[in-house]
Image (spheres, rainbow, N blue to C red):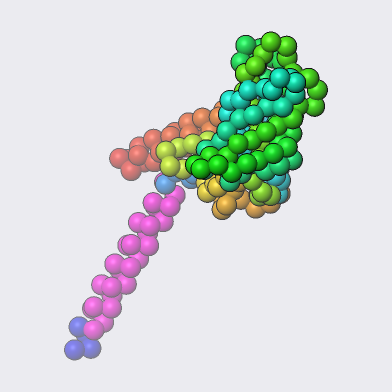
Amino acid sequence: MRGNSIGVFLVCSLLIAGVARAQSIRDRTRPSYSTGTAVTESQAVDLTLTLTEASIRPVQTWLRTAGTIDSGNKVLTAYLYPPETEWVKVGQRVRAFPPNAKSSVYQAKVTRVVNQPGKVMVEATLVGPGRENSPHYVLEIIAERGMFLSVPNEAIIEEGDKRVVYIQQHPGHYVPQEIHTGVQGELYTHVMHGLDEGAQVVTFGSFFIDSDFKLKAGGQSAMSNDQHRH
């Protein structure tokens, strides 16, 4: 019985050692997706590579609608419908321009909000007189959605249901990081999970870095397959 026990023990030990060795081989040949990608200083200059800090900042959305101006050429009237009705408030800044003169942008402020069945009426008063003979305007009401940890919209790369940004691990070296997002504003997007405040995130140049990273990762996968075949 003792001899049988020793035999079983030896067989188990050999199996465990074999599994550990196989795991070690897989670890050495598996492509490393966490190593990121490197960019030289000259490449960074050519790409105008830009970094922005993930930080707490106001996230704004623009509520767009059409409106008309009064006979005094000063007060704009427009309507908003759910769900945008909950975000409009007196005092918000407004950009307005006639559809036939989009380069003529006028500044205004929301001076009145009136709830009506299924909508709200919004009045915005221009800082100065509007454009002559232009009764119709496009209004962009700037709504503050709150203070959030956020990154610029151009930093985010969409991959199906995933959102990825590249963060600077150290100068010239960047790694991908999946994030979970909330409110998407006109300039910044709320990051709910995946980033710490102060992380240096690639904005301009992120698509080049993403392509370079995937190219290198694809090369590592090909090398791994070759090693497995040999």
Residue at the farthest bottom position: 1
Residue closer to the observer: 206 or 146: 146
Q: Is residue 56 above or below residue 122?
A: below
- For the point 44% across and 33% down, the residue is 219
Q: Position of residue 21 (x, y in %)?
A: 37, 59
The reply to whether residue 175 is in sight is no
- For the point 70% across and 32% down, the residue is 124
The reply to whether residue 110 is in sight is yes
Q: Position of residue 111 (x, y in %)?
A: 73, 37
Is 8 on the left or on the right of 107, as rendered? left
Work out which quarter of the rendered image holds the N terminus and state it. Answer: bottom left
Q: Is residue 134 above or below residue 126?
A: above
Q: Is residue 22 magenta?
A: yes
- For the point 23% across and 78% down, the residue is 7
Q: Which residues are magenta?
A: 5-29
Q: Position of residue 58 (x, y in %)?
A: 70, 44
Residue closer to the observer: 68 or 144: 68
Q: Is residue 156 magenta?
A: no
- For the point 23% across and 88% down, the residue is 2
Work out which quarter of the rendered image holds the C terminus and state it. Answer: top left
Q: Is residue 212 above or below residue 162?
A: above
Q: Position of residue 192 (x, y in %)?
A: 57, 52
Is 129 on the left or on the right of 16, as rendered? right
